[in-house]
Amino acid sequence: MEQAVKTTCPYCGVGCGVIATVAEDGAVSVKGDPDHPSNYGRLCSKGSALAETIDLDGRILHPEIRGEPASWDSALDLVAAKFAAAIAEHGPDSVAFYVSGQLLTEDYYVANKLMKGFFGSANIDTNSRLCMSSSVAGHRRAFGSDTVPGTYEDLELADLVILTGSNLAWCHPVLYQRLAAAKERRPGMKVVVIDPRRTMTTDIADLHLAIRPDTDAALFVGLFSHLVSNNAVDQNYVAAHTSGFAEAFATAAGVSFGEVLERTGLPAMQLREFYRLFTTTGKVVTCYSQGVNQSSSGTDKVNAILNCHLATGRIGRPGMGPFSLTGQPNAMGGREVGGLANMLAAHMAIESAEDRDRVQRFWASPVLAEKPGLKAVDLFQAVADGRIKALWIMATNPVVSMPDAAAVEAAIKACPFVVISDIIKDTDTARHAHVMLPSLGWGEKSGTVTNSERRISRQRAFLAAPGTTRADWWQLVEVARRMGFADAFAYETPAEIFSEHAALSAFENDGRRDFDIGAHVGVGQDVYDALEPFQWPQPAGQARTESRFFADGGFYHEDGKAHFVAVEPAETDRANPDYPFTLNTGRIRDQWHTMTRTGKSARLSSHIAEPFAELHPRDAVEIGVGNAGLVEIESPLGSAVVRALITERQARRSIFAPMHWNDQFAARARIDAVVPAITDRFSGQPASKNVAVAVKLFKARHYAFAVSQAKPVEPDAAYWALAKADGGWRLELAFTTPVQHWADWCRRVFTIPDGVEPLGYADAPTGDVRLAFFDGTRLLAAFFLACEPVAVARNWAIAQLTAEHANLRKRFALVAGRPGADKPDPGATLCSCFGVGVNQIVAAVRGGCHSVEAVGKALNAGTNCGSCRAEIKGIVDGCLAAAAE
Ligand SMILES: Nc1nc2c(c(=O)[nH]1)N[C@H]1C(S)=C(S)[C@@H](COP(=O)(O)OP(=O)(O)OC[C@H]3O[C@@H](n4cnc5c(=O)[nH]c(N)nc54)[C@H](O)[C@@H]3O)O[C@H]1N2
Ligand SMILES: Nc1nc2c(c(=O)[nH]1)N[C@H]1C(S)=C(S)[C@@H](COP(=O)(O)OP(=O)(O)OC[C@H]3O[C@@H](n4cnc5c(=O)[nH]c(N)nc54)[C@H](O)[C@@H]3O)O[C@H]1N2
Ligand code: SF4
Ligand SMILES: [Mo]
């Protein structure tokens, strides 16, 4: 019988509800849950493609010790023995966990409890350090707690929505769609986007402030003093609920309008307009994400924003407030359980003796960490120094995602004992594991996650555990038991863990801590199974009234007030003639981080199939790189080679490169190998957005494009980038040295069986080589080589992998590398749901479709998940503008 299960998307912090259906034949399909209050039925491209990413290809299905299959017992015994030995010999601070905002709350709770309460060290940090820690630090400085005051609905109710350092259209697509729909209903609503580059999000902006990198603090400090000079301060709110206003203003007053202009590089008109909008609009929401957090001044940026909302009393009321957008599906859950090295559990403070005592009594634990542990960057430094003897990495891929990634890799490699819990066998990090533990993946695991608006939802299993995979919490519990802590880790189910977590949140709370879900203490399996999404707080015995915080004060500092923070904008000038470019890094629409899951979907890989750098046209001319050429990005630490994407979206002397590509998908595109480990001094969060680099032309002798049924094996080329395609794989290549026998090279890389002869030619004058290998009527691989970037139509070539090549004429047409006149080249895929290409959309616009809706009617493009609508609008606008010229 068909079975439909309500669960939650495992990607971004929007936390969309998903209905997964398993058909009788086992086929899985997903759709948005119409009843889930985060998405009301919508899903973005990544959510819609979930069913394509849950196959068992590449999964690790059984434990391994040094690459050899092992039983769970022997693997867990070894982990327990090694951690126990390190603690006994070198003390508790000689071990560490590095975990993830992609763990479920129950996994996270157990990891934190084991490290802080039973090992007695706080050396547990998480990839949230790279993600949300500046927001956490900023919240705690201002509110005395790590509280996100508002809800998603506020974005729909606001009259002014400011998005700073957020590419919402690509990174929180469903929330973006909710905002776009609200703006369509109420065109008077204004959107301001603050981002050094033009993005798909700037598309809905009434005002785009393309500030110089890392000048947000100056911008908001200037706004603060503008609010004061223009009598926009809510004196009652400030007097009743805040402290430190005078000091913060004294500092802000020292930053003149002229100085803000100079630092941000904005035209005076734009700056005035922004300040005017903020001053005169009551309902303002300011959303911020990694352009704010991932900065050496990230915490100050956060507080500069919070100051403006506190000064105007625009916080915690409908349509008003600062809003930190969380990245990962359970970044918030991790913060609730205290998964950061400088937090305790349930939003308690590790610095507070009273809180430590409270947690220790609740856990009945033998020891409790007395001081904050090592933050991610320092933690891997300690691994490099040999101070960490045993390290457990869970649900994160630091060899790709940590700054100074080569040093992180070297540190992990040299660590005496490394345990890795993952679902994928070959990742850049997993190859250094001593013990590899196979975890349950999405659809198999069960527990809770908390989204950006404090909404707790269930992830539910709808698939059987493959192989001998086990839940992350179970792995931790088994190790805890083996180390003598059986009583404190007696859980049999996630529901039991959740209940304990709820109990700790309520323990001696009495309204003193924001995080309280006491209403869920003692949930049984049935109630847990049926748990509907809910927003915290939900204290025991109180009916839920208001889900926002701080409209009437009630802050969590000792004095009950919010604290203004005097922010002095950081110096941003660091001109270095050897590294004249600024590298900005971030995300693309259809990939998730290190691509271990989204990289499995041909559909998602078709949107952008290669690592790239966006580069201003005039810089491209100076460097000498043409469109589709390659560039090398260099810093003192390392380099990466990526495709040049020449565009006026970039400011001069700055480039943007995605963080996703790694050694599994490209030759040398791990961008964090270029990024130094510079951190914010309050939060320890790395500055991943503003890196001094040199950008040079990467000179190749040959360029090639290939499609192959078999996964290409070790393509030894100076540049390669591999992506999944329908019916096989696609491969972009560039060579700096000639290859003697191209056919032999292809045979090896594409695993062509003996006896299959290539069809094709090598043209000596042009240097072109075309080779195709057929097995009967099916194409095994095709290879197109030229001395310039290869112009062959990619989607057409890929389609040949699944086409019948019944006669020689068809096979020769393939070698010629040209689509037939009957089948025009669709161009690069834009709508991944319906596989619609750029050329098709351009043709439709030229044929009379003059709006996104009209294109949708003609081609279906943009009518399912809607993630590509902003890009379609760009094409429509571009074509119409060109036609009008
Ligand atoms: N498709 C997709 N979505 C994702 C993810 C993913 O991997 N793929 N990951 C999720 C996670 S974990 C996270 S944390 C979020 C991140 O979500 P976002 O923060 O929205 O994404 P980023 O692309 O990292 O960066 C956002 C923007 O900050 C801008 N920026 C750079 N420097 C500055 C600056 O100095 N000031 C300002 N104001 N802006 C600046 C960049 O140009 C970029 O457009 O996305 C989540 N959603
Ligand atoms: N230069 C630069 N670097 C960045 C950023 C940036 O913007 N620029 N962004 C930073 C940010 S905000 C983030 S959040 C990080 C993200 O960086 P990572 O956390 O390193 O990236 P992921 O690919 O999400 O890694 C998740 C890993 O967990 C595995 N996994 C998936 N499901 C499960 C499960 O259920 N259990 C277990 N045990 N494993 C599982 C996946 O296969 C994968 O290996 O990157 C950071 N690094
Ligand atoms: S917006 Fe997309 S990635 Fe984020 S939770 Fe919703 S469906 Fe998943
Ligand atoms: Mo993140």
Image: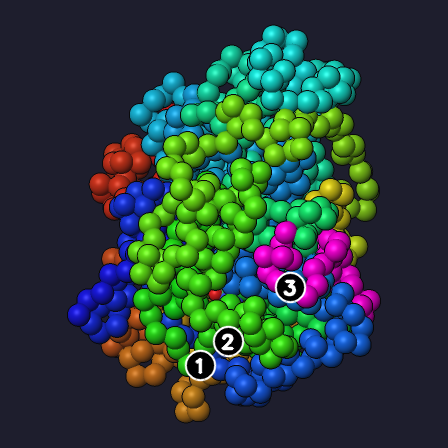
**Looking at the image, is mark 3 or mark 2 nearer the viewer?**
3
Find residue 625 and report its horizontal and vertical position in percent.
Answer: 63, 49
Q: Earlier in the sequence, mark 3 or mark 1?
A: 3
**Vertical relation: 201 (above or below) 5:** above
Residue matched to label 1: 468
Q: Secondary structure at mark 3?
A: loop
Q: Secondary structure at mark 1?
A: loop
Q: Amino acid at mark 2?
A: Pro
**Residues under labels 3 and 1: Cα distance?**
31 Å
Find residue 383 and report its horizontal and vertical position in percent.
Answer: 76, 67
Residue matched to label 2: 438
**Looking at the image, is mark 3 or mark 1 nearer the viewer?**
3
Between 135 and 241, which is closer to the camera in this rendering? 241
How many marks the image carries: the answer is 3
**Residues under labels 3 and 2: Cα distance?**
29 Å
Q: Which quarter of the rendered picture does the N terminus lie within?
A: bottom left
